[in-house]
Amino acid sequence: MNEFDKPLFIREIIKTSHDMHIKGWTEANGGNISLRLREEFVKEVSAFEPQSDWTSLNGSVPGLANDYFLVSGTGRFLRNISLFPEKNVGIIQLDDKGENYRILWGYEGGSRPTSELFAHLMTHEVRKKESKGVEHAVIHTHTPNLIALTYHKEYTTAEISYILWAHHVECAVVFPEGVFLLPWMMAGSYEIGRATADAMKVHRMVIWQHHGIFASGRNLDESFGLIHTAEKSAEIFIKANILGGVNSKPDLERLQKIAENFGKKLNPDLVKELNSKT
Ligand SMILES: [Zn+2]
């Protein structure tokens, strides 16, 4: 791959990482991106000469056996992907059991996949199954307004979902299933990856308390768009509070009508929980 012959998925990760940086979500080496490569690209990259031995994932994702991924590098700055994609991202291949990976391209200068690789892969495995193979892109990033909400109060998943639905009504249409709020866990651990992936059976976004957000979508645009919409709502909520407080907002009934207008339905479990408190 040379400068003038970048495949579409490289151009997409350049655009998405740049947009994430412009939004202020990617300080230093914060955030990471992974993309499960589509069939048309697998044909090309599977012919690449392996650049490493097999490395254990220290876990198993059999639902992703023989899949190929574009993954940002550990310690690398997402804002630099546009400058040197070959240093800051790489392509990996999983083995036929989903237990080991090897590098096929990238990570030049001695990098390797993000330290959150296994969390990404567990999420991919769940979302690949739940979406029947439609979802390919996972983004983890540090969105200041959503993070600020987790410092403001110990919200529940239902409460934070309602805040986001209510303060930018687009949210009721974009993610009617709500956003899962995961209490603080150690980043990079198996436990946070497992808990995130388990929550992804229902949700496409998981907020990590005091840290950031994980999102899964069909492509990088959709994952970015989910996060962008939620983050904007958190920003509106915070701005309204700076103005003196929220004195006017849609109730659940109105939000449900907005969702239904687009053929969607708010997560019934969250609606039930919210109604039981009012
Ligand atoms: Zn992080």
Image (tube, rainbow, N blue to C red):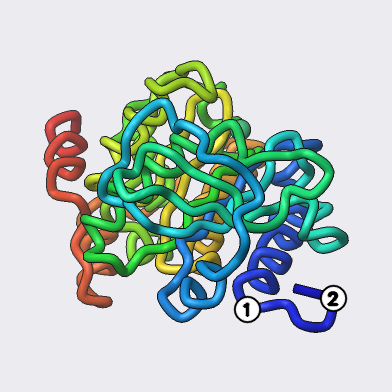
Q: Residue at x 22, y 68 (%)?
A: 264
Question: Which callout, 1 or 2, points at the residue further toward the start of the chain?
Answer: 2
Amino acid type for the residue under numbered disc 1: Leu
Q: Is residue 189 left or right of residue 256?
A: right
Place of residue 169 in the rendered image (x, y in percent of width and height, measured from the top left)? 41, 61
Q: Residue at x 69, y 73 (%)?
A: 11
Q: Kindly identify the amino acid type of the residue bearing the numbered disc 2.
A: Glu
Point out residue 26 in the picture as x, y percentages from the top left corner. 73, 44
Q: Find numbered disc 1 in the image and state the secondary structure of the residue it sits on.
A: helix
In the picture, the disc for residue 17 is: none
| Label 1: few (<14), some (14–19) or many (≥20) C-alpha neighbours in 10 Å | few
Q: Which residue is mark 1?
A: 8
Q: Is residue 244 visible?
A: yes
Q: Secondary structure at mark 2?
A: loop
Residue 228 found in image quarter: bottom right
The local crowd at label 2, few if under 14, some if 14 to 19, many if 20 or more residues have their Cα within 10 Å, is few
Q: Nearer the viewer, mark 1 or mark 2?
A: 2
Instruction: Pinpoint residue 74: horizontal percent, then vertical percent.
Output: 68, 36
Q: Which picture quadrant has residue 198? A: top left
Tags 1 and 2 touching, CB below 8 Å: no
Q: Which residue is mark 2?
A: 3
Label 2 CB sits under 8 Å from any ligand 1 atom: no
Q: What quarter of the picture does the C terminus occupy?
A: top left
